[in-house]
Amino acid sequence: MGIVSGSRVPWEAWNIATFRHMHATATSPHWLVALAALLATLPLYASFALTAWQLVRSRERHAALGLTLALAIALATEAITSAFAYHPRPFAAGFGPAWMEHAANNSMPSTHVTLALTMSLIVGLRRHTGTSLALIGMSVLMAWARIYVGIHWPADMIGAVISACLSSALACALLKLVERQSRRADCFRPGQI
């Protein structure tokens, strides 16, 4: 999808206008830009740590397997999107500077936000509501920060939500299918009849 400043496509026009409204400028407070640069990455590591702590504490191997599968599906989805639907980052498309170092690779969807939201969904499905809400909060902060520092579009965050939901749903469905097949196989073991 090409980014054109005077685009007549409503989706692109919304994306560009929202980005311009949210993006830091040369007159933005330096402390806020520095904070956003930290929040653009740090919450992902905190999300991994919090998720690992929750799953280890509750000894949920099945959830850990589901999470691993969902994260793998999310990363595969991103690779496919990059290969077939490249979308330049705002700074690469000429819409202002990036206020932190970042490669000018595909922007859609935001990997950081996708991974954090996927963790929140898998943990939430295991009824760890407090942890899930904390992960969602970190995802929202990260989404804002990545737009603010100019390395993502608002549409990339919508893509991240969609990718996380689809990846989590597909991982859960695949695990249920494997469980059903495993139970059927157990019925045919010698001595089980």
Image (cartoon, helix red, strand yellow):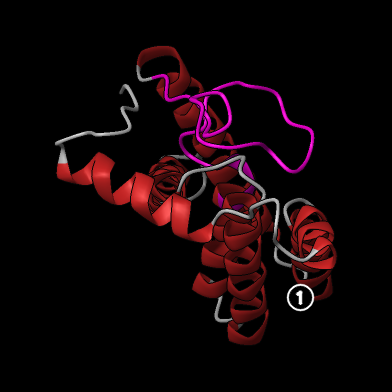
Camera-side residue of 136 and 185: 136
Residue 175 x/y as whole percent: 46, 48
Graded by Cα atoms within 10 Å as few (under 14), some (14 to 19) or many (20 or more), the crowding at tag 1 reads: few
Name the one closer to the observer, 16 or 52: 16
Q: Nearer the viewer, residue 57 or 77?
A: 77
Q: Is residue 151 magenta?
A: no
In the rendered image, the vertical position of residue 71 relative to residue 40, given as above or below: above
Can residue 104 be found in the magenta stretch? yes
Residue sitting at x 64%, y 67%: 141
The answer to whether residue 102 of the structure is visible from this angle is: yes
Q: Main secondary structure of the magenta part?
A: loop
Residue drawn at x 41%, y 24% as measured from the top left: 81
Q: Which residue is mark 1?
A: 58
Residue range of the region highlighted in magenta in the rendering: 86-113
Residue at the extreme top = 83
Position of residue 132 relative to residue 151, above or below, is below
Position of residue 10 measured from the top left corner of the image (x, y, whole percent): 16, 45
